[in-house]
Image (cartoon, grey):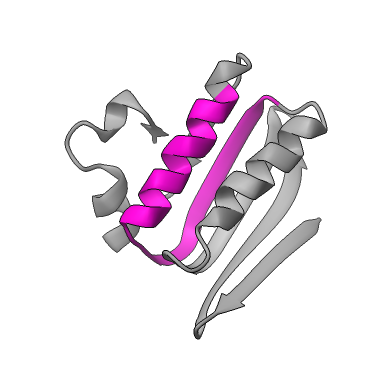
Amino acid sequence: MAEADARVNGSLATIQVRTSERGPVLRVSGELDVNNSHLLVETVRSLHLDGQRMVAFDLTDLTFCDASALAAFIKASQHLRQVGGRLVITRASGIPRRVLTFPGVDKYLEVQ
């Protein structure tokens, strides 16, 4: 399982990548904000370069995300859609779920 960590200005996010039958699952934990949300897009682009077109995010352990994280999820989703791929967000709760389900976001993101 590959892992990417970013600690910037005291905030920490961890992205663990594991494979499943349908493609990679990225388990995000900690807090995503303006200081580290770029990790989402970078990780998805890296997976795409490896030929992956279906990516799932498991947000079970994500405790916080802000508008910059929302923008990063949308950017990553758009990147995959341009190449015929798909991004799915699962298991979001609390603040992340509220941010990811703002009215109109469902046009850009698939949140289950």
How many marks the image carries: the answer is 0
Q: Quadrant of the N terminus?
A: bottom right
Q: Is residue 61 above or below residue 1?
A: below
> Which of the two residues, 74 or 88, is positioned nearer the viewer here?
74
Q: Which residue does the image show at 28% across and 61% down from the upper left?
A: 95
Task: Name the residue located 72 percent from the left edge and 51 percent from the top edge.
Answer: 17
Q: Residue at x 33, y 60 (%)?
A: 66
Residue 83's place in the image compared with 105, above or below, is: above
User: Does residue 104 lie above or below 90 as drawn?
Assistant: above
Which portion, as a residue range, is magenta?
A: 53-80
Q: Is residue 62 left or right of residue 97?
A: right
Work out which residue is located at the far bottom of the displayed protein and give it: 10
Residue 57 appears in the rendering: yes
Which residue shows up at 55% across the image and 78% down it?
8
Report if residue 39 lies within the magenta region. no
Q: Quadrant of the C terminus?
A: top left
Left or right: where 20 falls relative to 84 = right
The residue lying toward the viewer, choosing from 100 and 43, is: 43
Q: How far from the left and from the top, in percent, is residue 55?
A: 62, 34
The quadrant holding residue 54 is: top right
Residue 23, how many percent across, how many down?
A: 71, 31
Q: Quadrant of residue 51?
A: top right
Residue closest to the far top: 84
Where does the image place residue 93, in percent across and percent down from the top left? 34, 56
Would residue 93 be visible to someone looking at this image? no
Query: Is residue 59 found inside the magenta-colored segment of the image?
Result: yes
* Residue 105, percent from left and from top: 27, 34
Q: Is residue 96 left or right of residue 44?
A: left
